[in-house]
Amino acid sequence: MVRGALVALLKLEPDFEIVADAADGELAWDLVKLHKPDLVVSDIEMPKLTGLELAQRVHDDAGNTRVVIVTTFARAGYLRRALDAGVRGYLLKDSPSAQLADALRQVHRGGRVIDPQLAMAAWTEQDPLTDRERQVLRLAGEGSSSAEIASQLSLSQGTVRNYLSEIISKLGVSNRIEAYRLARQQGWL
C-alpha cells in the first residue's frame, strides 16, 4: 500500500518517470539491472534483500544509478550503514511528499539529502560491531545455534562463542537475545 501510494505521488510530478516498482529487494535488483534507472527509491526493510544490501549492489555494480532510502527507521546506525553502502539520500516516511520530490531532484543532480536530525545523531553514535560480529549476531538472533552459525560462516563453534561473548560484553547485555534486540533497535543490524 505504501509503495503504491509513493508511486502514485511521484507520478504526479511532471519531470519524473516511474519505470518499475518491486515488492522485494531481489526483484528490485533485477529491475535495476534491466532498466538502469537514474534513481532507486528503497526502504530499509524488504523481503529477500534489504534496502541496504540493494544499495550496496547498486553502488558496486549499477553505474550511475543513485539510491535514496525512504523509511520509518530514524536510527543513526541505519543511516551510517546506508552511507557506507553509497546511499545518496535518507529520508523519513513522515516527511512531506513535496520534500521527497525535491530531495529526489537534488540527488539526481548529484547532491546528497539526509534528514538533518538523523545526520547529527549518526555523527555522535558509534556502531560498536564489526561486520563479522554483525553476521554472527544476525544469525543468532534469527534462532541459529552456535553450530549452525559456525557451519554457515565457515568458523569453528569456539570462534562463534567467542564472537557472541565479545558482542554481549561490548553491548553490556546479558545474553545473545538481548544483544540482538539492542542491535536491531539501534540500527546496527
Image (spheres, rainbow, N blue to C red):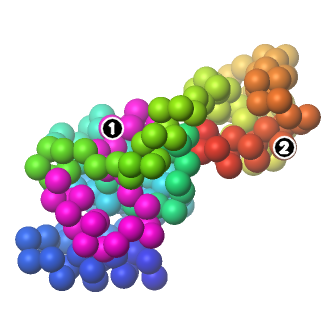
Question: Does the magenta segment cover residue 81?
Answer: yes
Whole-Å distance between the Cαs marked 2 and 1?
A: 30 Å
The quadrant in which residue 95 appears is: bottom left
Q: Position of residue 3 (x, y in %)?
A: 40, 75
Q: Is residue 167 above or below residue 41?
A: above
Left or right relative to 30: residue 151: right
- Secondary element under disc 1, as helix, strand or loop, is loop
Q: Which residue type carries mark 1? A: Gly
Residue 170 located left or right of residue 158: left
Between 57 and 74, the one lying in front of the other is 74
Q: Is residue 13 above or below residue 100?
A: below
Q: Which residue lies at the image location 37% right of the left edge and 81% below the top edge? A: 4
Read off the magenta span.
80-106
Q: Is residue 95 visible?
A: yes
Residue 177: mark: 2
The residue beneath circle 1 is 86
Identify which amino acid the numbered label 2 is placed on.
Ile
